[in-house]
Amino acid sequence: MKKSVITLVATTIIAIANLASAQSVNEVLDNHFKAVGQEKLSDVKSYYIKAKVSQMGMEMPMEMKIKKPDKFVMTVDVQGQKMIQAFDGEKGWMIFPMMGPDPQPLEGDQLAQVKQQVNMEGELYNYAEKKSTAELIGKVNIEGNELYRIKLTTENGNAKDYFIDTKTYYINRVKAKVSGQGQTVDIEQIMSDNKTVDGITMPMKIETKSPMGTGTIIMEEVRFNEKFDDAIFKQPAK
């Protein structure tokens, strides 16, 4: 009998603790969504980005076009040759000049990463509906910034840490493990230079650190609700 009472009390305490944790996570995320204009972002139908990518001593122009619900194409100009990754709603494809001029299918980890790009609203928004879980680990101090650390775990078990500024509620950085070419590496993305466009606030600078080196994306132009023909997402004939 005593064990039953102790078990009941312990279970109740755990349940209350879990509820409190969930409320804290949702409170932080609600403040984040308000800060970035998530409600307006949810109404956006398409998204155009013109940017500059700096990596390995090179500067490469980049264009990205996303159309709801599931279309994406990114073009990077690498020394006069165009590298393309795309998803047309059914299949992914790429053109990589070093592999020849013909389009190649995207599969496995590469395809999964491209599909993530299609999600304009981000992984944190409506995470429970996407069968993900979010846990508020606590606060950390990184480079003088006090940040909430939220661990997001997707339905397939992939975990990612989001660090949200306790003052602005903007995402400061994201840490994750990314798989590709038979290996898994740690990736850190640092967001800065936030700017508001049409009531939506987003970082204009994203620095990515990995064992392969550091790369930076500088957003030069952002436009919402552009009209894109579905044909631009389709794989061209060989």
Image (spheres, rainbow, N blue to C red):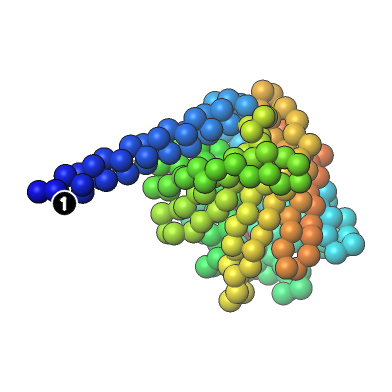
Could you tell me if residue 38 is visible in this image? no
Q: Position of residue 218 (x, y in %)?
A: 81, 45
Tell me if 23 is positioned left or right of 39 in this view.
left
Q: Which residue is mark 1?
A: 3
Nearer-the-camera pick, 144 or 229:
144
Specify the quadrant of the image occupied by residue 48.
Answer: top right
Q: Image height check: is 129 above or below 157? A: above
Residue displayed at 30% across by 40% down: 13
Find the residue positioned furthest to the right.
57
Could you tell me if residue 46 is visible in this image? yes
Q: Image height check: is 59 above or below 200? A: below
Residue displayed at 66% across by 60% down: 187
Nearer-the-camera pick, 50 or 124:
124
Q: Residues within 10 Å of mark 1 (few under 14, many from 20)?
A: few
Tell me if 74 is positioned left or right of 37 in this view.
right
Q: Position of residue 36 (x, y in %)?
A: 63, 29
Q: SS class of the residue under badge 1?
A: helix
Find the residue positioned furthest to the left.
1
